[in-house]
Amino acid sequence: MHFDVLTIFPKLFEAFRTTGVLGKAVERGLIGLDAHDLRGWADNRWRQLDDEPYGGGAGMVIQASPALAALRELAGRGVPARSIALGPRGRVFDQELVEELAGEGRLVLLCGRYEGFDERLYEIMEPEEISLGDFVLGGGEVAAMAVIEAVARLVPGVVGDPGSVAEDSFRDGLLDHPCYTRPAEVEARAVPEVLLSGNHEAIRRWRLERAVEATVTRRPDLVKRNWEKYSDEVRRLIRRIAPGMDLERD
Ligand SMILES: C[S@@+](CC[C@H](N)C(=O)[O-])C[C@H]1O[C@@H](n2cnc3c(N)ncnc32)[C@H](O)[C@@H]1O
């Protein structure tokens, strides 16, 4: 999987691409990550990209032409790419989309700043728009990092133990179960007995029950959305833990 990021702050990606699990994946050639300076496509010697908005108002707008040239140049390089513009009006990023993107060979991620891009960029290139959620960031870089980190986790070999990815929240429509580590007691709170029992089946059932409990109480919307894909065991647990729950999809 290769990520090409277009940004006016490529430096932000220096530590990101060399640190932790992602850094190792880049080092081992499992992931490619290049951050390109959008100013490299500016058509003036001051490398200025932004200008005042037509119609007046606050803030500056990034001109369409440099971003169009950059997207076209990157699209023409290497493996076919899916172009994504990060922005608050896009499809809200979730694990379903992460799984979809992980099936691609290359992603080009376009990060806005200021008031965003001239609308003609979207009209001409029609990039897919992805939002991190209903809030406004100062730029698309943090959103691009979120996309990269979530997608990279699903690339085979990036996370050492594939089991840990398979059990992540949302993979099976459930939140994750709680986790504990040494010591066995913290400020008079003991680890649940069953986790010390060595009984694998009892531990599996306990974890599944806690995952269902967490999902039903914290994210009932997930239960409705994923009902069709739950196993009979999960459905029985949901009915037991939340007998009155409305399972009709909105
Ligand atoms: C200050 S924001 C522009 C906000 C824009 N004026 C609006 O209200 O929709 C600058 C850039 O940050 C990024 N951004 C802001 N919020 C985001 C979000 N929720 N998800 C993804 N990117 C976001 C986009 O790339 C955007 O072009």
Image: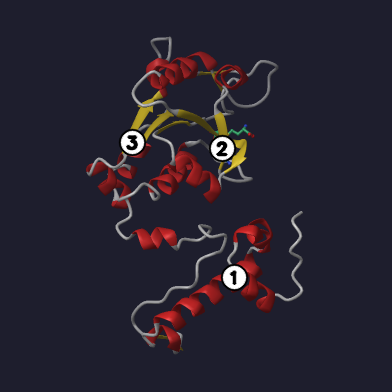
- The answer to whether mark 2 and mark 3 are in CB contact below 8 A is no
How was this image coloured? secondary structure
Q: Mark 1 points at which residue?
A: 234
Could you tell me which residue is drawn at 65 percent across and 62 percent down?
Answer: 223
Distance, label 3 to label 1, CA atoms, is: 39 Å
Decide if ligand 1 comes within 8 Å of the CB at mark 2: yes
* Residue type highlighted by circle 2: Ile
Disc 3 is placed on an element classified as strand
Q: Where is residue 165 in the image (x, y as percent from the top left)?
A: 41, 58
Q: Where is residue 144 in the image (x, y as percent from the top left)?
A: 46, 39
* Furthest residue toward front: 232
Q: In which quarter of the image is ligand 1?
A: top right
Q: Name the residue under label 2.
A: 130
Q: Where is 172 relative to 178, above or below?
A: above
Q: Where is residue 168 in the image (x, y as percent from the top left)?
A: 46, 61
Disc 2 is placed on an element classified as strand
Answer with mark 2 or mark 1, whichever residue precedes in sequence. Answer: 2
Q: Name the residue under label 3.
A: 33
- The answer to whether mark 2 and mark 1 are in CB contact below 8 A is no
Answer with mark 3 or mark 1, whichever residue precedes in sequence. Answer: 3
Q: Where is 30 relative to 197, above or below?
A: above
Distance, label 2 to label 1, CA atoms, is: 31 Å
Could you tell me which residue is drawn at 28 percent across and 42 percent down?
Answer: 30
Q: Quadrant of residue 137?
A: top right
- The answer to whether mark 3 and mark 1 are in CB contact below 8 A is no
Q: Quadrant of residue 246?
A: bottom right
Q: Nearer the viewer, residue 145 or 250?
A: 250
Could you tell me which residue is drawn at 48 percent across and 19 percent down?
Answer: 67
Quadrant, the C terminus: bottom right
Q: Where is 160 relative to 27, above or below?
A: below
Drawn side of residue 185 relative to residue 129, left or right: left
